[in-house]
Image (cartoon, helix red, strand yellow):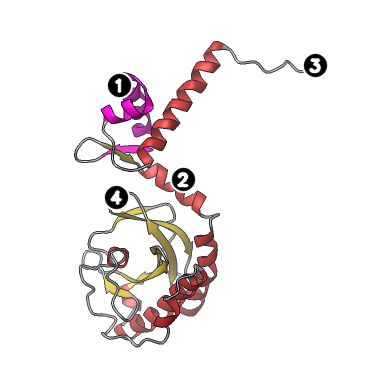
Amino acid sequence: MPTPLSSSPSQAGQTRTVDRALDLLALVCDGGAPSLSECARRSQLPASTALRLLRTLEVRGFVRRNEHGSFIPGTRVLQVGALALGRQSLVRLSEPGLQRIVEATGESAYLSMRGPGDTAVYVAVAEGTRAVRHTSWVGRSVPMEGLAVGVVFAGRTPACGYVAQRDPREPDVTAVVAPVTWAGGIAGAVSLLGPTYRISDATMEEFGRIVSAEARRVSEQLGDPTAGTATGTPPTAPASSPAPHGGAR
């Protein structure tokens, strides 16, 4: 007969350690960049125990320290979270549109969401069909400063409905980005990324209309009452014009 499962003292101690580590991780992910002393106080752990567990999480990439020494979510949390988000409604609603962008342009299309701090996290992709294409960045986070996606998440998308620009730091990449909106603000961003040599000024404008139309479609499904009003709005500036503080991606 099978031996009944039982918890030894060592197993109970391991479970308690995992519980404490997960509590600390949840505390850090709640935001506010807590310090070590705040983590210890809020978790009701000795500071030495909290530090030991946080260091383990830091080594594994689940937390990291900012410039002030406080704790913020690490890259691994973003990757795990991005995979989990794949089952959520925003990703499900966006996937058909991402695929239509690929069918219309041949270039890779992404959905990104705001990450911790000033970052964006790519949570879904439809890879392009061309031999030379932008490959999957799902789970990857990028600083938004200086990027087109940052302009979009900052709410500075121009009247044409999208931000398109060649990245001055990576001139071989061009991005076209449009916001997905809902009643609470900006829920995400739809992006097209492709090699600059293949995207002329005229092509960039055409891609901008395609990307913004798909982003509006998702916004309408999310219940944004203003999303449909932008349909058919002509661009007020050439798509190749540099976006304010914008860059590719």
Q: Residues within 10 Å of mark 1 (few under 14, many from 20)?
A: some
Q: Quadrant of residue 73?
A: top left
The label number, if any, that marks residue 117 in the structure image: 4
Earlier residue among tags 2 and 4: 2
Helix, strand or loop: magenta stretch: helix
Question: For the residue labelled by badge 3, is the local secondary structure a helix, a strand or a loop?
Answer: loop
Q: Pointer 2: what residue?
A: 80
* Residue shown at 27% from the left, 67% from the top: 151
Q: Nearer the viewer, mark 1 or mark 2?
A: 1
Say whether marks 3 and 1 touch (CB < 8 Å). no
The mark nearer the N terminus, 3 or 1, is: 3
Give the distance between the C-alpha atoms of the residues marked 4 and 3, in whole angstroms.
Answer: 54 Å
Q: Which residues are magenta?
A: 36-65
Q: Earlier in the sequence, mark 4 or mark 3?
A: 3
Q: Earlier in the sequence, mark 1 or mark 4?
A: 1
How far is the residue under mark 3 from the one under mark 2?
Answer: 39 Å
Residue at (49% x, 75% y) in the render: 217
Q: Which residue is mark 1?
A: 47
